[in-house]
Image (spheres, grey):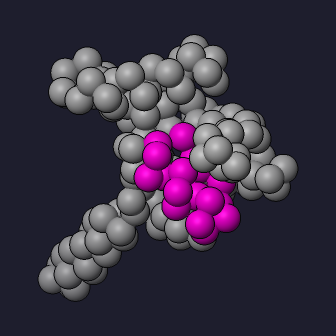
């Protein structure tokens, strides 16, 4: 009986890890914008302090790393991580990009998720249309996804 439980646990763990690896979190807004426009999906801008923000880590564990969220994200959004780490290094370009978006969307705390739609103008400039924002919401993936769906329906 113990062997069966161990095998079942290992199988579920490996499936969960494999599913998480399938998500692509972009860090370059330019590339993410192109994908968003091409696939006609809103962007999911996750403002986080990945190496110090307890609520960000909790949101990732309780929602973003679940099979329900992974399935939903693949079908509905282009994921972008805008990180403000204290220990991990980033390029100056990424730091500048993240700071500009933080200021533009008036992000005051972490975690914050903004949903935006992107469009290019005739002169190839990008316009971001803010659809709405969210943060940590208690209740797990279903509650969080229901709230996100209400926001992205504005697209």
- Residue 107 counted in the magenta span: no
Which residue is farthest front?
123
Residue 69 x %, y %: 54, 60
Who is closer to the viewer here, 81 or 54? Answer: 81
Is residue 8 found left or right of 6 in the rendered image? Answer: right
Residue range highlighted in magenta:
29-45
- Residue 35 counted in the magenta span: yes
Who is closer to the viewer here, 127 or 86? Answer: 127
Residue drawn where x is 34% and y is 24% of the image:
95
Who is closer to the viewer here, 3 or 19? Answer: 19
Residue 97 x %, y %: 42, 28
Image quadrant assignment for residue 58: top left
Is residue 67 found left or right of 95 in the rendered image? Answer: right
128 is higher (above) or lower (below) than 3: above
Which residue is farthest left?
3
Image quadrant containing the N terminus: bottom left
Who is closer to the viewer here, 75 or 6? Answer: 75
Image quadrant assignment for residue 18: bottom left
Residue drawn where x is 67% and y is 64% of the image:
40
Residue drawn where x is 54% and y is 51% of the image:
33
Image quadrant assignment for residue 89: top left
Residue 106 x %, y %: 63, 17
Residue drawn where x is 60% and y is 47% of the image:
124
Is residue 30 found left or right of 105 in the rendered image? Answer: left
| Magenta highlight: main SS | helix
Q: Is residue 48 visible?
A: no
């Amino acid at each position: 009986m113990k062997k069966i439980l161990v095998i079942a646990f290992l199988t579920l763990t490996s499936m969960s890890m494999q599913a998480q690896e399938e998500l692509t979190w972009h860090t370059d807004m330019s590339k993410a914008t192109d994908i968003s426009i091409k696939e006609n999906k809103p962007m999911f801008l996750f403002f986080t302090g990945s190496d110090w923000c307890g609520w960000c880590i909790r949101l990732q564990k309780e929602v973003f790393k679940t099979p329900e969220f992974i399935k939903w994200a693949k079908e509905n959004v282009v994921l972008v991580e805008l990180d403000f780490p204290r220990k991990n290094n980033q390029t100056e370009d990424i730091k500048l990009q993240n700071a500009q978006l933080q200021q533009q969307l008036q992000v005051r705390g972490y975690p914050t998720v903004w949903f935006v739609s992107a469009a290019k103008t005739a002169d190839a400039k990008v316009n971001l249309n803010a659809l709405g924002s969210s943060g940590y919401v208690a209740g797990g993936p279903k509650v969080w996804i229901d709230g996100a769906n209400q926001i992205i329906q504005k697209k």
